[in-house]
């Protein structure tokens, strides 16, 4: 088959659309591709197709959008104040996120096309972060027109909203860059002077002059570039504590002060180059660590950027454009294809398809039916939909996920606290060792200061203190992308030590949606009519089993009454005749003992005045990943269910695991404690709200996300896509995490053990110690960030 000239997808056989390229007709697969390709070709940008490295994304067909005013809302001053700035020349500027860029040809096309738009002063596209910085004259062109221009060539623009966390990191970033620039510039000058001082070929007057110049040049490095280190150490000491910056600061400033004293008195040796090099190399190391940690922190902060700035609210007067945070519960909003949903709500339209990859880790589009929950941040496909708002802005599920993710990044597990205590004890030990080294070399008639400085720097426990928090942060962020939200970091550390896992059945391993397997009817009874009576009764009572009869049309029958019988079933009247529809307990009450073995796997029994006239066997459907989960897990797996029916037996048989049914919450708790006595560490996977007692007893508690507020869950881990395979992902990540942690601790402790004797005996010079310590920290951080990769 022919491939589309624009998106490279196959062209449907019935499609006859084409575009003209150098006089030749090229086939395209849809009107959207045709429209975009024509804009590119007619604008003289056909080089895009020659040099692109990847096929373009298939654009949305404009004919499905109704009108071309989708971006008009961004011309509003109240909306622009969040992401648009105005300079002294009254030029407007904004950062725009652009979806669909894949290669340098994409960036080239956007820059060239926008630069031809009247009123656009400048345009810079960054392919790495998929953003464009645009400056324009608002009297000549509106922001909506710029957005429409980007959309016309096949890309999806949206305002880039910088989060508070990202703002703070950017400020720190700029500060680091300024301090590094000063440190780098002056350190080079001091090093050149030091090189001359190393050789006794210059006159004494020049040597004295060079020392003073070195003092003046090193002062900005030590007191400006080294200020973050000094401030950190001061704060620790003022709180009567010691952190890893204390020995480093002591090394830097003792070196500088000793060299300054030698300069003032014109005696001894000076080591200004060592002090400046310490600062420069340490700052470089900290800056690189900062860049790596920023990536993990911004991953969770960027979740809130999925919330659009504007919403299209339906009113009696028509569609009104409002700021997203002005929406209220009960409002009705309209969302177009290619747009993200601004609030949690119920679907009023018949059906739709949405993408929830950022929310649940589900990469494939999900089909939704009328009444289903649509989450804020979901990307709408195919058609315009209408939603009734249930939760708004910072209370949305998306905001809760971001909040819990940030909580994990900031929290400390018992192992993390242990690592901190070890680092503090190591720091104190380093200080005492450096003093002992100084005294020892002084007694031997040597200048002990430089040996002590080498000990201080070489054995600073920076790598030890970074080993765990960076790994935990990276692992939790990686799991969030896969649809597993970690609320308590200890679960990440301990999941690979699980010996047994207990699962609830309904809603955990099964969908809670039932289907009919077999129908038994007495010969004198009409099966179709009986099924309609049962279906109508189940639907009228809103019983969960009603899903097993959703395919039966009950519009042509009218029940006289439906009454619920506690713990037994339903009493139904139809055309004056009474029916009883219920469970095994109802059967036991109204049937003879001999009849009870007739249908062993039946869940629904139907009676009339003549006795039992029928029975129905239903099945609770397993979730798509339940069988895969059980096959993959190496743990002892059991079902702890409150369900009394044979549905538990069926599910357990399919999954090939043991089961206990008919358990109360207290009995579940008791059974879990028995499992802990038998197997050791046990996890419980269930309903985060209703199974709170047994979840609290488990070593690790895991909840399925059933749509309740995340704050209600009493669980360490929440599976956002409600699939059991998330348990496997958690355990696999825990295994990777603990391997990385072991590597980090072995490296950090091993390096210090090796560097210490070398520094004490003078083999490791101060500048070598700085390089070694910096490299050690960077190795640990880089190793931890491998967890972000799949």
Image (cartoon, rainbow, N blue to C red):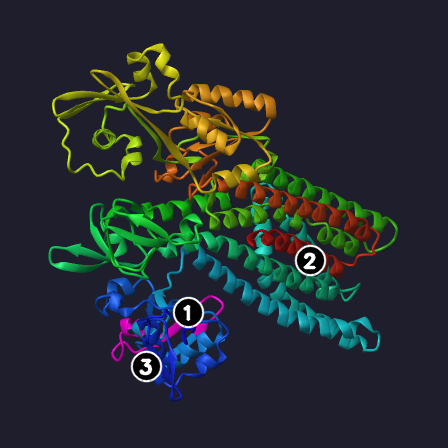
Determine the residue positioned at 84% across, 74% down: 200
Q: Earlier in the sequence, mark 1 or mark 2?
A: 1
Q: Could you tell me how far apart the alpha carbons at marks 2 and 3 are, in whole angstroms?
A: 49 Å
Q: Helix or strand or loop: what does disc 2 sit on?
A: helix
User: Label 2 crowding class (10 Å Cα cut-off): few <14, some 14-19, many 20+?
Assistant: some
Q: Residue at x 73, y 74 (%)?
A: 193
Considering depth in this image, is 64 or 106 the residue closer to the camera? 64
The residue segment tinted magenta is 125-147
Asked if 509 appears above or below 207 in the picture, the reply is: above
Q: CA distance from mark 1 to mark 3?
A: 33 Å
Place residue 636 in its image quadrant.
top right
Please check the rendered image and state whether residue 144 is part of the magenta-colored stretch, yes or no: yes
N-terminal of the two: label 1 or label 3? Answer: 1
Identified at 17% across, 59% down, the residue is: 319
Q: Is residue 121 visible?
A: no
* Quadrant (top left, top right, bottom left, bottom right) of the N terminus: bottom left
Determine if the magenta segment contains residue 495.
Answer: no
Disc 2: which residue: 775
Task: Determine whether the residue tagged by mark 1 lies in a helix, strand or loop.
Answer: loop
The image's mark for residue 367 is none
- Residue indicated by mark 3: 117
Residue ID for mark 1: 10
C-beta proximity under 8 Å, tags 2 and 3? no
Residue at the extreme right of the image, as rendered: 444
Vertical comparison of 273 with 643: above or below: below
Q: Are marks 1 and 2 in contact (CB under 8 Å)?
A: no
Residues 436 and 621: in front is 621
Residue 629 in the image: x percent, y percent? 52, 39
Specify which label sits upstream in the sequence, 2 or 3: 3
Number of numbered callouts drawn? 3
């Amino acid at each position: 088959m022919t491939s589309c000239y624009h998106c490279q997808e196959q062209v449907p056989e019935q499609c006859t659309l084409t575009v003209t390229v150098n006089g030749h007709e090229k086939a395209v697969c849809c009107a959207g591709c045709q429209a975009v390709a024509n804009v590119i070709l007619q604008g003289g940008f056909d080089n895009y197709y020659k040099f692109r490295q990847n096929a373009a994304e298939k654009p949305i067909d404009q004919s499905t959008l109704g009108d071309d005013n989708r971006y008009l809302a961004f011309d509003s001053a109240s909306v622009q104040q969040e992401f648009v700035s105005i300079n002294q020349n009254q030029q407007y500027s904004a950062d725009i996120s652009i979806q669909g860029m894949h290669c340098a040809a994409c960036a080239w096309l956007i820059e060239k096309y926008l630069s031809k738009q009247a009123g656009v002063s400048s345009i810079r596209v960054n392919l790495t972060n998929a953003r464009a910085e645009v400056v324009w004259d608002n009297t000549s062109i509106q922001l909506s027109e710029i957005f429409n221009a980007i959309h016309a060539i096949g890309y999806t623009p949206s305002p880039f909203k910088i989060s508070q966390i990202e703002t703070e990191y950017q400020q720190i970033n700029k500060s680091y860059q300024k301090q590094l620039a000063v440190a780098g510039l002056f350190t080079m000058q001091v090093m050149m002077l030091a090189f001359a001082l190393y050789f006794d070929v210059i006159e004494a007057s020049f040597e004295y002059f060079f020392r003073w110049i070195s003092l003046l040049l090193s002062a900005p490095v030590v007191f400006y570039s080294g200020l973050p280190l000094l401030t950190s150490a001061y704060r620790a000491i003022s709180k009567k504590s010691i952190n890893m910056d204390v020995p480093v600061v002591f090394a830097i400033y003792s070196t500088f002060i000793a060299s300054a004293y030698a300069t003032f008195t014109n005696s001894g040796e000076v080591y200004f180059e060592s002090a400046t090099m310490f600062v420069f190399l340490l700052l470089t190391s900290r800056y690189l660590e900062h860049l790596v940690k920023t990536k993990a922190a911004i991953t969770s902060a960027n979740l809130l950027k999925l919330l659009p700035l504007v919403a299209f609210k339906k009113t009696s007067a028509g569609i009104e454009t409002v700021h997203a945070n002005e929406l209220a519960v009960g409002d009705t909003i309209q969302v177009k294809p290619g747009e993200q949903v601004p609030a949690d709500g119920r679907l009023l339209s018949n059906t739709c398809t949405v993408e929830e990859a950022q929310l649940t880790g589900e990469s494939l589009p999900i089909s939704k039916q009328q009444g289903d929950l649509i989450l804020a941040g979901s990307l709408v496909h195919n058609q315009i939909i209408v939603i009734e708002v249930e939760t708004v802005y910072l209370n949305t599920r998306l905001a809760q996920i971001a909040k819990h993710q940030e909580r994990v990044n900031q929290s400390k597990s018992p192992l993390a606290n242990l690592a901190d205590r070890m680092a503090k004890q190591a720091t104190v030990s380093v200080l005492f060792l450096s003093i002992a080294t100084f005294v020892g070399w002084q007694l031997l008639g040597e200048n002990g200061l430089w040996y002590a400085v080498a000990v201080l720097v070489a054995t600073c426990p920076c790598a030890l203190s970074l080993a765990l928090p960076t790994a935990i942060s990276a692992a939790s962020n990686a799991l969030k992308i896969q649809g597993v939200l970690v609320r308590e970091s200890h679960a990440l550390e301990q999941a690979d030590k699980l010996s047994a896992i207990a699962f609830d059945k309904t809603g955990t391993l099964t969908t809670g949606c039932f289907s009919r397997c077999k129908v038994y009817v007495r010969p004198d009874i009409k099966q179709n009519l009986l099924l309609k009576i049962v279906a109508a009764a189940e639907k009228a009572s809103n019983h969960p089993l009603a899903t097993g009869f959703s395919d039966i049309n009950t519009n042509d029958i009218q029940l006289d009454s439906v009454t619920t019988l506690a713990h037994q079933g339903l009493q139904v009247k139809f055309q004056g005749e009474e029916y009883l529809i219920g469970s095994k307990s109802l059967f036991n009450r109204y049937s003879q003992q001999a009849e009870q073995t007739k249908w062993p796997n039946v869940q629904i029994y139907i009676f009339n005045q003549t006795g039992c006239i029928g029975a129905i066997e239903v099945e609770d459907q397993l979730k798509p990943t339940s069988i895969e989960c059980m096959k993959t897990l190496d743990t002892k797996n059991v079902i702890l269910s409150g369900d009394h029916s044979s549905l538990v037996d069926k599910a357990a048989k399919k999954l090939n695991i043991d089961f206990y049914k008919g358990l109360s919450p207290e009995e579940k708790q008791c059974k879990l404690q028995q499992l802990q006595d038998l197997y050791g560490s046990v996890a419980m996977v269930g309903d985060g709200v209703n199974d709170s007692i047994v979840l609290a007893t488990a070593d690790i508690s895991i909840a399925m996300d059933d749509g309740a507020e995340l704050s209600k869950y009493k669980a360490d881990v929440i599976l956002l896509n409600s699939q059991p395979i998330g348990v496997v992902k958690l355990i696999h990540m825990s295994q990777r995490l603990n391997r990385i942690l072991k590597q980090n601790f072995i490296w950090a402790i091993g390096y210090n053990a090796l560097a210490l004797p070398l520094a004490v005996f003078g083999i490791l010079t101060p500048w070598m110690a700085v390089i070694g310590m910096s490299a050690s920290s960077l190795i640990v951080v880089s190793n931890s960030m491998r967890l972000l990769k799949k």
